[in-house]
Amino acid sequence: GIQVEQSPPDLILQEGANSTLRCNFSDSVNNLQWFHQNPWGQLINLFYIPSGTKQNGRLSATTVATERYSLLYISSSQTTDSGVYFCAPDNYGQNFVFGPGTRLSVLP
Amino acid sequence: KAGVTQTPRYLIKTRGQQVTLSCSPISGHRSVSWYQQTPGQGLQFLFEYFSETQRNKGNFPGRFSGRQFSNSRSEMNVSTLELGDSALYLCASSLLLLGEQYFGPGTRLTVT
């Protein structure tokens, strides 16, 4: 099946800083989602972005399917942004496969 | 619109027992997927149901099974529980197969 890598594995930021999270995948995809898992375990949709760029407030995402990567940008980070960020591309149209995640800690 | 609900939220079982978890999708959603999350293996796909039919299955033993009802609610069952089945079980619903997925809060299962 498709292989998914995320970098960095861990990230510590000061409140107000910007960051870029990367997701690489081993094959072409039709769909890709980004999620934020909060400290209570709830997975929250951020973006459904098989290609192109989308923005939602302080967050934006870009997927370049032909080059097999997606980026998540977080600007002006807040402590509530802490948690684990997952990307999940589809596995040859069968199901979504989750990457190992990037653990983000935003310090006040 | 109400979100995805899962019951129970927490469960403690003994090795060898079986367990049934329930998931109610967002109204109008016909696809329900199940995932297992553990610290060692991360988030792994279990299976997906659409219109009461299992469409895809992950690489899990036959002890893990599921079903979907005509109202799109889904249950998953794990028989002969093992210590390694301790995990957070998450369900997600979507309007379409491989559509945008919305997750429930999860059921945390502990096997002793």
Image (tube, coloured by chain):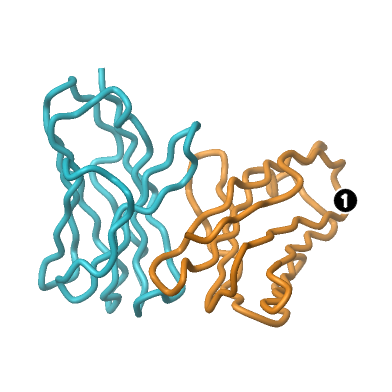
Looking at the image, residue B34 sits to the left or right of residue B50; the answer is: right
- A14 versus B92 height, above or below: above
In the rendering, at what x and y percent does residue B85 appear? 30, 31
In the rendering, at what x and y percent does residue B32 appear? 29, 65
Residue displayed at 20% across by 51% down: B22
Residue displayed at 38% across by 53% down: B45
Residue displayed at 11% across by 66% down: B69
- B111 versus A84 height, above or below: above
| Disc 1: which residue | A16
In the rendering, at what x and y percent does residue A58 appear? 77, 65
Looking at the image, residue B103 sits to the left or right of residue A35; the answer is: left
Q: Is residue A55 visible in the rendered structure shown here?
A: no
Name the amino acid type tagged 1: Gly
Q: Is residue A52 visible in the rendered structure shown here?
A: yes
| B85, B90: nearer the viewer | B85
Residue displayed at 71% across by 67% down: A69
| A53, A25: nearer the viewer | A25
The subunit carrying tag 1 is A
Q: Quadrant of the C terminus of chain A?
A: top right
The chain in orange: A
Looking at the image, residue B66 sits to the left or right of residue A18; the answer is: left
Looking at the image, residue B111 sits to the left or right of residue A3; the answer is: left
Which hue belongs to chain B? cyan
**Residue farthest toward the top in the current orientation of the protein:** B112
**Residue farthest toward the bottom in the current orientation of the protein:** A52
In the rendering, at what x and y percent does residue A62 appear? 73, 73
| B84, A75: nearer the viewer | B84
Where disc 1 sits, the SS reads: loop
Residue B38 figure quarter = top left
